[in-house]
Image (cartoon, grey):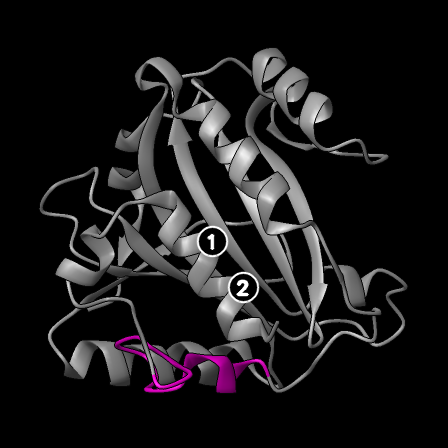
Amino acid sequence: MPLIQHVQNIYQLLADDRLENLGLFHIKNDRLATPVADDTLSLLAYRSKRADQIVPHSVVTELVNAFKVNGRYKGVNHIGFCYKTDSKDDAVKAIIKEAGGKGYSVYREPSIDDADWIFVGDLSKVTNPLLEFLPNEGKADDKWIDYYLPHIQFDIDTNITPPEIEALVKKIIRRPFTPYSIQIDGITYIQRVNLGCIEGVNLMLDIATNNRDSNYRKSWTKLT
């Protein structure tokens, strides 16, 4: 199954069409269109050397459905594209030019890692889903580079505690180091599931815990 089909299958499984309704995300004719590029996968020029191996869609379906029980799933927070670039500054300027030129706002979230965290969308409602673009210059001698560059992440909101998410994931996906806890100051905000790699692109499912508050977006810097 090609990469674009995996992306479409996961997106449809999340059953949240707000990104499409906002004009931010659309798959047609084997292209993934966003305000930044008519063929957004073209941004992922650098491809991982990992062998193709992906969690079966039936397993992903079981996992997502487990979070939908009793209203615990709140919807898509954002879909992100992390990709290697020669210049983060030039990449951000390109995002602003393309998305801003189409009338979309662009924001930067403060980060301490190697990528710029750039978001595109409408924050007039703080819970609106967004697109994230993470241009990363990468380090050629980083032995883990092919495990995180490039990747597409599907980030979803839930009202579930970190231990509950961890238990659900481990019950359904029996893989070492899964999920991976993303923490700030010792607080787990995301439980990340690496779904594998297809056509040199890593796919991630980021499951937000009940520790995340959408109001954190109010601290972002608006670039356009």
Q: Is residue 167 above or below residue 65?
A: above
| Mark 2 element type | helix
Residue position for label 1: 10
Please indicate, yes or no, whether residue 216 appears anywhere in the rendered image.
no
Image quarter in which the C terminus is found:
bottom left
Tell me which amino acid carries mark 1: Ile
Marking on residue 151: none
Q: Tell me: residue 29, above or below residue 14.
A: below
Q: Please say whether residue 35 is one of the residues in the magenta stretch.
A: yes
Q: CA distance from mark 1 to mark 2?
A: 6 Å
Total marks shown come to 2
Q: Would residue 103 be visible to someone looking at this image?
A: yes
Of 148 and 222, nearer the camera is: 148
Q: Amino acid at mark 2?
A: His
Q: Are marks 1 and 2 in contact (CB under 8 Å)?
A: yes
Tell whether 118 sits left or right of 146. left
Residue that carries the numbered disc 2 in the rendered image: 6
Residue 26 percent location from the top left of the image: 28, 71
Q: What span is colored magenta in the figure?
A: 29-44
Q: Nearer the viewer, residue 89 or 96?
A: 96
Please give the name of the residue rendered at 17% of the width and 68% of the height, measured from the top-left corner.
Answer: 23
Nearer to me, 71 or 130: 71
Task: Report helix, strand or loop for mark 1.
Answer: helix
The N terminus appears in which quarter of the rendering? bottom right
Image location of residue 176, percent across then percent down: 86, 34
Q: Position of residue 156 (x, y in %)?
A: 41, 38
